[in-house]
Image (spheres, grey):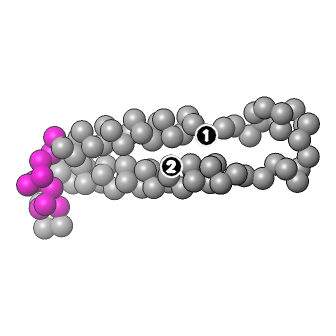
């Protein structure tokens, strides 16, 4: 086992599996919270292009989704090294 992942054995594999499960559920919820490109009035063409910019909430949701996906990916790599 690599010394880099030695801390993972002391923490417990089941904790990493549970954390991976929780981050996967959170990631699914975050992806489903994103609105599609053609939703609402903007999708029907009633909103001018100048008002079609992204709002601060959408940008923060995107940032949070990226952070959670990176945490999920890192945890998956740790699990792969632990279980492999």
Q: Is residue 39 left or right of residue 24?
A: right
- Kind of element beneath mark 1: loop
* Sequence-first tag of 1 and 2: 1
The answer to the question of whether label 1 and label 2 lie on touching residues, with beta carbons closer than 8 A, is: yes
Q: How many marks?
A: 2
Question: Looking at the image, which residue is at 57% across and 37% down?
Answer: 33
- Main SS of the magenta part reads helix
Q: Residue furthest left?
A: 10
Which residues lie in the magenta part? 5-14
Q: Nearer the viewer, residue 22 or 78?
A: 22
> Around disc 2, counting alpha carbons within 10 Å, would you say few (fewer than 14), some (14 to 19), or many (20 or more)?
many
Q: Is residue 51 above or below residue 45?
A: below
> What residue is pinned by disc 2?
65
Residue 17 point in image, percent of width and height: 23, 41
Q: State the SS at label 2.
A: helix
Determine crowd level at label 1: few under 14, some 14-19, many 20+ residues with C-alpha closer than 10 A: few
Q: Residue at x 42, y 39 (%)?
A: 26
Q: Horizontal and vertical percent for residue 14?
A: 16, 40
Q: Which mark is residue 81?
A: none
Task: Identify the residue at image location x=89%, y=41%.
Answer: 47
The residue located at (42%, 55%) in the rendering is 70
**Which numbered disc covers residue 34?**
1
Estimate the spatial distance between the alpha carbons at disc 1 and disc 2, rounded to whole Å: 9 Å
| Left or right: where 77 falls relative to 41 | left
């Amino acid at each position: 086992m690599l010394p880099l992942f030695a801390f993972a054995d002391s923490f417990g594999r089941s904790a990493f599996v549970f954390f991976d499960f929780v981050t996967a559920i959170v990631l699914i919820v975050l992806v489903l919270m994103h609105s599609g490109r053609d939703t609402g009035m903007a999708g029907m063409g009633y909103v001018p292009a100048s008002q079609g910019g992204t709002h601060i909430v959408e940008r923060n949701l995107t940032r949070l989704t990226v952070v959670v996906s990176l945490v999920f990916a890192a945890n998956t790599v740790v699990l792969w090294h632990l279980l492999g």
